[in-house]
Image (cartoon, rainbow, N blue to C red):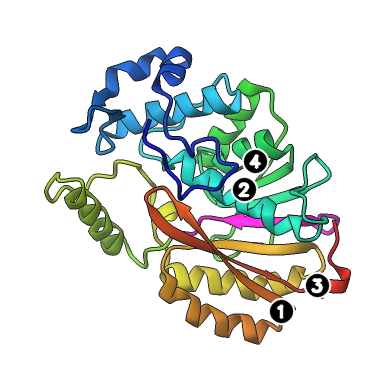
Amino acid sequence: MAVKPMLHPRNQHREGYDFDRLMAKSPDLAAYVTLNPRGQRTIDFADAQAVRSLNGALLRAHYDLEFWEIPPGYLCPPIPGRVDYIHYLADLLAGENGGRPPRGAQISALDIGTGASLVYPLTGQHEYGWRFTAVDIDPVSIASAREICRQNDLSIDLRLQSNPEDIFRGVIRRDDLFHVTLCNPPFHASPEAAESGSRRKWRNLGRGNSGALNFGGQNAELWCPGGEVGFVARMIEQSAEFSEQCLWFTCLISKKDNLRPLSRVLDKAAVAETRVVDMAQGQKESRFLAWTYYPKRLRRL
């Protein structure tokens, strides 16, 4: 197995993929397993169906799921990098819990843009036992997430965001209290930019100029007006309205250069504290932005 030392120390995938274990849980994966030039087993990450099969195997083998399927064309996120976000969120909350990552259903998390895959609630609930509320603007994604919950007998609160201009408005209710929010935002500013990014990925995989998406993705999952900066700026502005209903707001940031304009938005929002948490997302470095309106003396779980 190829060790992935950049992943969080608690990440189950830090030692790489155990294909024997994965194929035992998901025999269909065997059809996609090949050898790389170093003689190690892998899959063709340019093959969308191979990526889906690997994801399903990982969720079955490591997160005790019996069923995981998503509609064709929907985002199929890489599991190891997504789980890293969950582990670093646990570290963030540990700061308010005597240095111990909190576990149990008393911790409430809000996943913005959960997608058809429901990957953050599925992995976060398994790893830490947190209670999740998951939101999306796409009815097909919510229906897919609901079926995953039904088939696996999971309790996750699913909410449809009816207004694509809103992020927290309309989905955070008066009696809601969250310890943390999380989000993997659309980071392109247009369909053309999303397609260009896909072509760049394919070239990096040595597959020419194809615009196909090996990890899939619908428009709302990949781009929005203003791109990542516009989306997260809107998130920060709306978070002020719910400052007392959430301990930490967080969001993934794909490009480090985007932190500078967002820091100005945070200054205007008069937050109590901001943090940038560096981590790995698969093979590349990434980070998430975190902010809270609670002063340190009032922050406790």
Query: Do the numbered discs 3 and 2 sit on residues whose CB atoms are within 8 Å?
Result: no
In the picture, the disc for residue 93 is none
Which of the marked residues, 3 or 4, is nearer the chain's N terminus? 4
Pointer 1 local density, CA inside 10 Å: few below 14, some 14–19, many at least 20: some
User: Which residue is under mark 1?
Assistant: 271
At a point 80% along the width and 72% down the height, the residue shown is 294
Q: Amino acid at mark 4?
A: Gly
Image quarter in which the C terminus is found: bottom right
Residues drawn in magenta: 173-186
- 125 relative to 273, above or below: above
Between the C-alphas of marks 1 and 3, the distance is 8 Å
Identify the element where label 4 is drawn.
Answer: helix
Which of the marked residues, 3 or 2, is nearer the chain's N terminus? 2
Pointer 2 local density, CA inside 10 Å: few below 14, some 14–19, many at least 20: many
| 299 in magenta | no
In the picture, the disc for residue 124 is 4
Which of the marked residues, 4 or 1, is nearer the chain's N terminus? 4
- 213 relative to 149, above or below: below
- 134 relative to 149, above or below: below
At a point 58% along the width and 82% down the height, the residue shown is 265
Q: Amino acid at mark 1?
A: Val
Q: Amino acid at mark 2?
A: His
Residue 205: x, y in percent? 20, 46
Using residue 289 as the reference point, say whether residue 53 is left or right of it: left
Inspect this view and state whether residue 48 appears. yes
In the picture, the disc for residue 294 is 3
Identify the element where label 2 is drawn.
Answer: helix
Q: Nearer the viewer, residue 162 or 199?
A: 199
Using residue 224 as the reference point, say whether residue 121 is left or right of it: right
Residue 295: x, y in percent? 82, 75
Image quarter in which the N terminus is found: top left
User: Which residue is under mark 2?
Assistant: 87
